[in-house]
Amino acid sequence: MNYPKLFEPGYIGRLRLKNRVVMPPMHVALTERDGAPGERLIKYYEERAKGGVGLIITEAGSVDAITSSTGPRSLFHTDLFQVPEFERLTEAVHKYGAMIFAQLYHGGATCKPAFIKADQPVAPSDVPAGPGGLVPRPLSTEEVKEMVGKFVKAAEMCQMAGYDGVVLHTAHGYLMAELISPYYNHRTDEYGGSFENRMRFHKEVIEGIRKVCGPAYPISVRMCGDEMTDIEGFMDLEYGIKVAKYLQDECGIDVMDLSCGSAVNPNANCEPYSYRAGWKKHVGKAYKEALDIPVIQTNTIKDPGTAEQFLEEGICDFVAVGRGHFADSHWVKKAKEGRPEDIRKCIGCMYCRERVIWKGLSVDCTVNPRIGCEYIYDMEPPKTGDGRPVAVIGAGPSGLEAAKGLADRGFKVTLFEKDDHVGGRMNLADKPRFKDIITGLTETMHKECVDRGVDIRLGVEATPEMVKEEVDPVGVFICTGADWIIPPVPGVEKANVCTPEDIFLGKVKAPKTAVVVGSGNTGLECVEKLQDDGAKVAMIDMLDEAGKGMYPVILNDLMSRITPNEPEVLLSHRLVEITDDGVVVEDVATGEKKNVPGELVCLSVGSRPNGEFIDSFYKMFDKVEVIGSAVKDGRIHDGIKQAYTKAYVFE
């Protein structure tokens, strides 16, 4: 399969890029404590360069060490002592023919006190990043001028370090976005008021960079082409194009890098799984038609075919593939080799953002167990298997990953699966609305095992005796997942009781009314599926809030589809009995009981491992590794990560 547009060279100013794929800036929290890159971050970027990308734009690097940082382990371009470390990074990227730009920013009102060395964030005016947020201190005119100098100095140091260009971060509610915004900028000095005054900061920064870095040094601006925020004063498409034309015509930038959204609407920037590829391509098209300089755009791109299509349609000149490079560092190389089916594609689960943005941890990815650990785990693992036999029990995500990893190590792998197909619980996870992309993950992981010669035995319920006789393995990996928990309440044996598996696989007839017990992620997806089938649904949970512990972006996205159908929600209620026509619940605070009608009762209260099955293997084999939900009920990420690491070191 060929992608001629995708692999056509392109130019940004005088800089030639070998293809049209850009890895956009994404905060990964892998930086050293001094704000410079260390081995961990360098290896992360180096692997994407090796994977074939044309241009890497490193995550936002602050130009101010005192008042600017929006997250943990952020980059800083503030001191000369950092330059040699950044030079290590640019050299690692350049050796594979990729170019690299540095994104420069100040977080403005979005800065969190926990991450800055000041008592209060600073901004153009005393306007919070979002309604009800922390009120920032307005910068004085002199401080604004000093900030211009900090951006210019940062660009100069980036050029010294070998960066091929710089990007001025004017998106997502950061300082440079606030300065051009009628919503945020209420200044009455030379940096506020008229449109030209709001653009003055950018003009002075760009003029300063040209003076110290030379007229040919590429300068990009990243901005939200449409902030898609229904609040007066936020930037719409028309105003955004006006800004972009000024930056092109009056400031002379070399490329426009488009995102969308705002500090109030981050989903338009980094979307959960319910958003489809190309949903904002009208934004890119409008800018490309209005500008003479090249346009880079993010567009929820998961696969190279979509990227090629958008280039053919003239949506943009360069496609930004962000989380696709989280999921598979060799996304570009596999596309160029005509192997799109071998790409592990992003599933839009937002686990990466959950880790970095919500929990303040380093980046991780559900489908890529090596991300952020490239400095620990080589892409080519040690080949010490020597053809020794290993058995893997269960072909869900952890079993497929274990089998692949062990085969890569040189072991002879036999994979047993009791069902007639691989995938395990992924065959349920791909059934809720918009989650069909998980089907592709199952297919890719299956192909990985087939390509490596794994002996896959479907429809075989493995026993220790069978495995011993047929394989005689040096070790056994148990990846059998877990069984649904059935709470011991009266009536649980009734015909109207089911599990999420019955809902997603269509084993039960769609009812007119239903009760779902448990409001975790799986329970909420059951509610959505039943509502889609026309049922009136009641949600029951002992906890005091639905989706407790879920990443708010995913929870809110899911609830935005559930809530309009007006489910009955009974939180802080305990299931005490199942009847022929519903359930009896009890208020955990008052003890008051209530009858809740429902033709169908779905129990979604978690899973637990089958300890007896696992113990039977421990009794027969010396080396047994128990992985994923076979240890503890968890997520796809947990199983894949554990399987990868255990397979990497198994001897």
Image (spheres, rainbow, N blue to C red):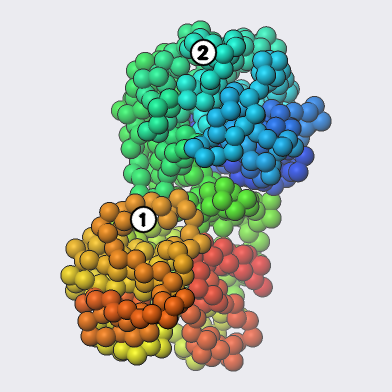
**Side (left or right) of 27 relative to 417:** right
Residue position marked by numbered label 1 in the rendering: 559
Determine which quarter of the picture holds residue 297.
top left
Q: Which mark is residue 193?
A: 2
Q: Which mark is residue 330?
A: none
Kind of residue indicated by mark 1: Met
Q: Nearer the viewer, mark 2 or mark 1?
A: 2
**Which residue is at 74% across, 43% downward?**
32
Q: SS for tag 2? A: loop
Determine which quarter of the picture holds residue 443.
bottom left
**Which residue is at 73% across, 35% downward?**
118
Kind of residue indicated by mark 2: Gly
Q: Is residue 519 above or below residue 67?
A: below
Q: How many numbered circles are shown?
A: 2
Can the viewer see residue 273?
Answer: yes
Q: Position of residue 383 (x, y in %)?
A: 64, 63
Q: Position of residue 406 (x, y in %)?
A: 56, 67
Who is closer to the viewer here, 54 or 359? 359
**Which residue is at 53% across, 52% downward?**
354
Q: Position of residue 584 (x, y in %)?
A: 32, 82
Who is closer to the viewer here, 471 or 483? 483
* Callout 2 touching callout 1 (CB < 8 Å): no
Which quarter of the image is occupied by the C terminus?
bottom right
